[in-house]
Each structure stands twice: as structure tokens, then as C-alpha cells.
Image: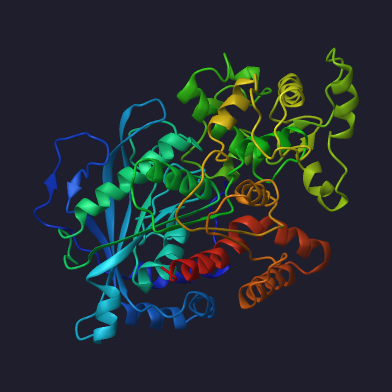
Amino acid sequence: MRLNKILLCVVCVTPFLGGCGGGGSSGATVATSTVHGTLIENPPLRVASLNAADLTAQLNASVSGQQLLALSGAPTCGIDYHYLQYWTVGGAGETVTATGVLMVPTAAPGASAAIVAQCSGPRPIVVYAHGTASQKTFNMAAVGDSTNPGYSESALMGAMFAAQGYIVVAPNYAGYDTSSLPYHPYLNAVQQSGEMVDALTAARSALGHIFAAGTTDNGKLFLTGYSQGGHVAMATHRAMQAAGMTVTASAPMSGPYALGAFADAIFFGDVDLGATVFSPFLTTSYQKAYGNIYSATSDIYAPPYAAGIETLLPNVLPVATLFQQNQLPQTAMFNSIAPNGTGNATLDALFPTITPPTTPAAQAPLFALGFAPTNYLVNNSYRAAFVADALLHPDGAVPTVTTGLPAVAPANTLRQAFKTNDLRNWQPVAPVMLCGGHGDPTVFYNVNTLVMQAYWAHLPIPLQVIDVDGGAAPVGALQQGFAQAEGVISAAAGGGVAGQNAVLQAYHAQLVPPFCSLAVRGFFAQF
């Protein structure tokens, strides 16, 4: 569920992508069918073509580029980038268009037999789900435009996977880029997993028709994604398994898997960084899908934010501009004046202790950012009703660990939607790795990764959990690199409290993604 901004060193890819050659695909056929999974133009437009030598040389020309090379390793393959346009289904079952990118590894003429074997012919496919993007213009195929909000994430996936011999399929999601859907079905597990399958189907239909016609699918299918995309990747694994599709392995990263528990934690006062952006995404998504989240947006949202909030995100404007224009509060999710006079003595006694919470002490400053006496997002009355339902129909992981399972029969319609999209309801048969950082202030590690690990603990599944920020099972050099990156960010901010705040701000969106991506690549390499 992150706002898109990845890895300090990823900005180094601007020079080589800005100068790469593209080249359209001549003789493309435009599909007449609107069946979901149909590739609209086949072959899809090739928007860029890079070779490994030029990519390596230009990365080596800058310190930041050298940092990325040190993390990802030198590119073995070139990459052809193709712009996918396909048909899919929206959150309410609408037939809509969506777009994405197909990255195809290539071998340079005269390359060694080993490189040809790694970069062409039958290759494994990685299907990648991106994190939360507030801007509608997000496009992971815009590899020549460093100002596009999808640029850095695309670059990271290219360096980590496509340049190492994986075919990469990455949808932009319905509601983004040129998609015909006027909203985004955010964390709608059925829609988003279905769209991932549709993007994969469309991409597979392109293979054999593109410039690198000899690069084909070898049958190995890997799923991964970060933050929002972590949830999407796990939901996609669940959907593919249920449909009888073969998944070789999956590796969700820092995702809100235990969605019901996570939402309850936030309403109990443990407000995460980004909550004021994620909330309207969620309520709009679930209102479009289920039609019962609110009668009017003012049922949930306080003035002046209720008016227009249903159509606010994704927006053509950056989220920082929305904050500046006071179309959203930057951090204040709730009123710092506690709800009172609810008619429920238990609630009236509870709210002063969690508005905001003061324990655990280390996280109290973070939680306090989620409260303000004015210009807060959610009405006191709605928060009180939500928490009342959470006390009456508790989640098994929040606020007290009991069963670890979602609430049995929540009555609040938003809590019902969270339960519908919670992923504590399936058992994978293919190997899974979960990666994240335990200090994440945006998607809480303990309420998501650890809750999911505990849910699967008694099941006979191949599960690996990686904490790039240390934890009980260190992974050596990976964690050392993460600690060094933290140190660089802290030092750049002057150290001390300022440095700690800088690390907090960078943790989810910049620090964790590249290190988890490297761990994921190592995991996939085992199969």
C-alpha cells in the first residue's frame, strides 16, 4: 500500500532509458473481441530496446548507478519493453481496458552461448504487482519518461529481473494510464487477481509475435508484488491455484494480507503513514464493488473532505499537491478529541486511551501523527461505530491475539468488505516467501506478515519469511546492506532525530523494496 517512490539509487537509470531506441511493431492486428485477457494490439508496441553493454556502462558512470549494480548485479541481458493494452473487468464487473508493460530479455548478436541461453529461448515469467500509486498517469511502460510515477518501479523490476533473464509482466491496473475505468478497484482481491491473470494471458499471446520472437514461456511462473502489490500477488496465487493454474512460487512483499486485522488496528488508533490516502481508495473501491459502504461519503468522512472524495483518487495531480490544496489531510486520519457520549460505557472509557495510543512508547510518535483537532479525515461517529463493531465481533489477531482468524460475522459494512478481501482463508501448495521489514510504519509487519506466518504455521506448506531489517532469522549481507542504506539516509538528514524521521519516511517506499526484490530473486532462482 505504498505511495510510489522507490530506492534512492533507482533514479540513476534516467540517462540510459532517456536515450534508448524504441521501434513500433509493424503489421499489428487490433482485436475485435472484448473478452477479458484479450490483447488489444498484437504484437504490442515496442517502446524501448536496451542492450546489456550500454546499460552496464551507463550505470557505472554514476555513483548511484554503481549502487544499483552492486545490488542487482550487472545486467546479463538486454531488455525490450512492450506496451500492453488488454481487456479486463472492473470492480463491479464492467468490461474495461487496462495497460501494462511486457519486459522481454534479449541477447546481443554474437553473445556467448551461455548468455544466449539465459536471455533468449524459453524463459520463466515473473508477474509483478506494483504498490499504491496516487497518480492516474502511472505507467510502467513509460521507460523513457523519468517524470512518470511508474518509471522508478519499472526500472527496478527491469534491473532485478528482466536484465537477468526473466520475462516480466506488470499491469498498471484498471483505472490508471489510459484505462477506461474511472476509478481503481483498490485491494479488491477478486478483481485485482483476475486482472493479473488477464495481463498474463495478454502477454503470453504476444510472445512469438514480438521482435524477440524466439523468447518464449518455459512454463515456470513466478508471482511477486510490493505493498498493495503484495496483497495482489498473494490473491493472484490463491486465484490461480483455485483455477488449476500452475504457480511455480510466489513472493509477496510488505503487503496488507490480514486486511481485517490491519484495518482494526488503525481504527483502534495505530494509524499508519499513508492512511489518509489509502482510506479513500478503499472506500471507493468497495462502494463500487458492493454498494453498501455508505449512503453518502459524509457518513464516513468529515468536512471539507467528504465532498468529491469518491472521485479524488487516482488523480492527475501528485498527492503532495492534494495535501497542499487541502483535498486530503497529510496524516490526520482521526479527531484528536476522543469520541464521547456514545451511549456505550466501554467505548467512552476506551477512546481517551487510544486517541492517540501511547503504547508501545516507541511507536507513539508515529500514531500521534494520525490525529488532529481539526482537518482530520474520518468522522468521530464513524470511528465509534467501527470500533464498537470490532469489540462486538473481534478479529482474532487485533487487538488481542486469540484465534488469529478474521472476525466471524462483522456487522459494519466496511469491516465486512475487509473480511471479504482478507487473505487468511487459503493454503498454498506451491512455495511462498514473505519479505518485509519489521520497522515498517506504513504496512505493519506484525499485523500482516507475522499474522500470515502464524496463520500458516500449522500447515504443511513450504514457507519462508525474510525480515530485511534483522529479526530472529538474519540473512547476513542483505540485512547489512539494508542497515547501511538506513545509515546513508539518516546521515543525509543530519543524523539524530532528523535522521530517524528521514528513515521513517523512507522506510516503506524506498528502503525495503530493493532489498526484498533481491531476496525474491534469490528465492525464485531455486526453482
Q: Name above or below for residue 449 compared with residue 281.
A: below
On the picture, is 405 further left or further right than 195? right
- Residue 97, position as x, y percentages in the image: 30, 37
Q: How is the image coloured?
A: rainbow
At x 44%, y 69%, the residue is 160
Decide if residue 173 is in sight here.
Answer: no
- Residue 297, position as x, y percentages in the image: 59, 20
At x 71%, y 41%, the residue is 331
Q: Which residue is nearer to you in this view: 134 or 130?
A: 130
The furthest residue to the left: 27
At x 26%, y 52%, the residue is 203
Decide if residue 68 is in sight here.
Answer: yes
Q: What quarter of the picture does the C terminus occupy?
A: bottom left
- Residue 183, position as x, y percentages in the image: 44, 32
Q: Name above or below for residue 454 compared with residue 337.
A: below
On the picture, is 299 further left or further right than 5? right
Q: Which residue is nearer to you in this view: 398 or 212?
A: 398
- Residue 488, position as x, y percentages in the image: 68, 73
Q: Which residue is nearer to you in this view: 345 or 501?
A: 345
Q: How many labels sit on residues?
A: 0
On the picture, is 511 further left or further right than 211? right
Q: Quadrant of residue 236?
A: top left
At x 24%, y 72%, the residue is 120
Q: Which residue is nearer to you in this view: 88 or 117?
A: 117
On the picture, is 520 further left or further right than 477? left
